């Protein structure tokens, strides 16, 4: 501290030089150090806070002080206020070019919410990250508070800087050739959907590996069920015991997502009528399996983003941190980074995260970053594939980034056509089974129209238009013998099957 506020710049510099003469004898950095037994306080850092207070200081004096700093191995930090409404009369512009590192601190107030930003204007002789980076000051988390799912790796408070989206994309762009080659070598096969009828309808036999697949359509169309069931089958496959998966939930909390996964594990049966784990008999057992065998073992991570003014840089960085980190399972067993990511409810982006929605590159950048790493991405979204985002469609950038697009819609269909044996049992050899007889009885007694969920393959990898359809049906009370309540059944639909109409 130099003392009085009204001291002239010359007095300030004289004070600094006097201190140097006292505590820092005049020897060059290449000369020998003082002999043993002679010691003094060696200053290492000089902070000038701020240059605005020095007024009309002569550039020659500033150059002298900078010379002293450079020859005495001092770290010199100068603060200069240049924000809106601040008049700067320091007239030191020529000297600013002498700085090796220039960092600009500023802020925006979108939606009356202050966003602190950091911009590395220049960093001489070293690489630095381009773009504005989000700076956030977090308080120390309370030991009694619920862990913040947005910051699962933050154990204490302080200043945190989240890299810009441009930084992440630059890194991904530099590694794209390596990752694309690795994707072709390590991910030759698609990830099968849980239903044979849907695998047969998709050219390639399922969700393309290392690419983005979009499941879009009406609310209540079982989109989350399809994505979550695919994830469970992927993790519980014997060959995938070391794989990790992540659910990025924009709608359901972690407890709600775990409950949904447990319901699927308990009720859903495959095409042969078998559950994923026959040993699970009730809901508590299913929830215990999800939490202890998948979540606690770090094979599954559920990121729930609470609605708020989360900046796009923070959201983006937290996702990158989760997908890139190696998993640590039981007994400190290390697992590879995530290979499957489910983004559930991305249509909630504009309503829950307005700052992220305003970033035009947010969705496309996020999906590019994930797929360039060879990660398979399943995205569920409400809305219609043929409408723009402002008119009830999907968020901006999602359709162009999706290699596979599947659209779900409710349709009013003639009940007798839905329950025909040709839909449920295309093979004539299956007509004589007890389930087939129950279906035939349902076909004879069915009348009127019923709403059903139809999935249509809108686009396949390679931008190929498809338009093959399958019927999605969830078992309920009163169904023919052989159906399980809460389990989804998928049946192929022939081309001549009527498209039906949307219920009002």
Image: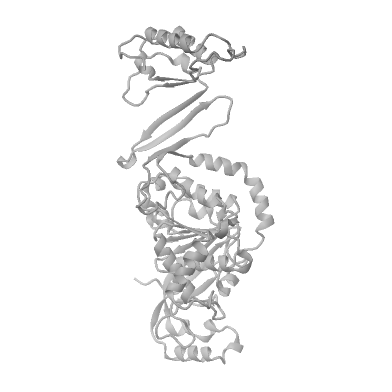
Determine whether 71 is above or below 355 in the image. above
Above or below for 412 versus 55: below
Residue 242, quarter of the rendered image:
bottom right
Q: Nearer the viewer, residue 44 or 67?
A: 44
Residue 138 in the image, given as x and y percentages of width and height: 38, 41
Q: Image height check: is 500 above or below 249?
A: below
Can residue 89 be seen here?
no
Which quarter of the rendering shows the C terminus?
bottom left
In the displayed structure, would residue 166 be above or below residue 198? above
Q: Nearer the viewer, residue 241 or 406?
A: 241
Q: Residue furthest right?
A: 185
18 sits to left or right of 89: right
Q: Which residue is depicted at the point 48% across and 90% down?
A: 438
Classify the position of the N terminus by image quarter. Answer: top left
* Residue 485 position within the rendered picture, expressed as x and y whole percent measured from the top left: 43, 80
Asked if residue 219 can be seen in this view, the reply is yes
Please tell me in which quadrant of the rendered image residue 221 appears. bottom left
Q: Position of residue 440 (x, y in %)?
A: 49, 90
Q: Position of residue 366 (x, y in %)?
A: 50, 49
Q: How many marks?
A: 0
In the picture as drawn, the residue positioned furthest to the front comes out as 37
Residue 115 in the figure: left or right of residue 130? left
**Between 337 and 467, which is closer to the camera in this rendering?**
337
């Amino acid at each position: 501290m130099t003392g009085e506020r009204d001291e002239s710049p010359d007095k300030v510099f004289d004070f600094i030089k006097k201190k140097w003469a006292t505590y820092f004898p005049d020897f060059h950095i290449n000369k020998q150090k003082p002999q043993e037994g002679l010691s003094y306080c060696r200053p290492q850092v000089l902070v000038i806070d701020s240059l605005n207070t020095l007024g009309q200081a002569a550039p020659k004096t500033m150059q002298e002080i900078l010379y002293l700093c450079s020859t005495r191995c001092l770290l010199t930090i100068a603060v200069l206020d240049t924000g809106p409404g601040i008049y700067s009369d320091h007239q030191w512009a020529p000297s600013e070019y002498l700085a090796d590192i220039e960092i600009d601190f500023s802020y925006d107030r979108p939606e009356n919410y202050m966003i602190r930003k950091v911009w590395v204007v220049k960093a001489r002789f070293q690489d630095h990250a381009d773009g504005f980076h989000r700076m956030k000051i977090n308080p120390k988390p309370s030991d009694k508070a619920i862990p913040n799912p947005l910051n699962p790796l933050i154990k204490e408070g302080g200043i945190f800087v989240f890299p810009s989206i441009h930084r992440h994309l630059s890194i991904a762009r530099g590694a794209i050739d390596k990752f694309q080659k690795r994707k072709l070598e390590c991910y030759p096969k698609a990830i099968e959907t849980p239903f044979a009828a849907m695998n047969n309808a998709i050219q390639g036999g399922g969700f393309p590996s290392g690419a983005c697949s979009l499941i879009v359509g009406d609310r209540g169309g079982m989109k989350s069920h399809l994505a979550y069931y695919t994830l469970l089958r992927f993790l519980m496959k014997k060959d995938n015991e070391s794989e990790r998966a992540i659910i990025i939930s924009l709608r359901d909390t972690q407890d709600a997502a775990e409950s949904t996964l447990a319901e699927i594990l308990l009720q859903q049966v495959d095409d042969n009528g078998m559950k994923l784990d026959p040993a699970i008999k009730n809901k508590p057992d299913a929830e215990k399996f999800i939490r202890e065998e998948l979540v606690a073992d770090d094979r599954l991570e559920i990121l729930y983003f609470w609605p708020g003014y989360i900046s796009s840089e923070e959201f983006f960085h937290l996702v990158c941190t989760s997908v890139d980190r190696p998993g640590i399972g039981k007994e400190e067993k290390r697992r590879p980074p995530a290979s499957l990511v489910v983004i559930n409810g991305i249509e909630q982006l504009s309503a829950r995260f307005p700052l992220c929605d305003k970033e035009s590159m947010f969705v496309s950048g996020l999906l590019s970053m994930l797929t360039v790493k060879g990660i398979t991405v399943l995205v569920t979204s409400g809305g219609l594939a043929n409408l723009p985002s402002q008119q009830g469609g999907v968020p901006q950038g999602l359709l162009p980034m999706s290699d596979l697009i599947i659209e779900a819609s409710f349709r009013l269909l003639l009940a007798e056509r839905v329950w025909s044996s040709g839909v449920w049992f295309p093979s004539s050899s299956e007509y004589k089974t007890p389930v087939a007889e129950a279906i035939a009885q349902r076909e004879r007694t069915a009348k009127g129209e019923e709403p059903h969920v139809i999935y249509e393959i809108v686009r396949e990898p390679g931008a190929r238009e498809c338009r093959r359809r399958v019927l999605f049906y969830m078992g309920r009370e009163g169904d023919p013998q052989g159906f399980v309540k809460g389990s989804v059944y998928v049946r192929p639909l022939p081309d001549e099957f009527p498209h039906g109409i949307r219920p009002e």
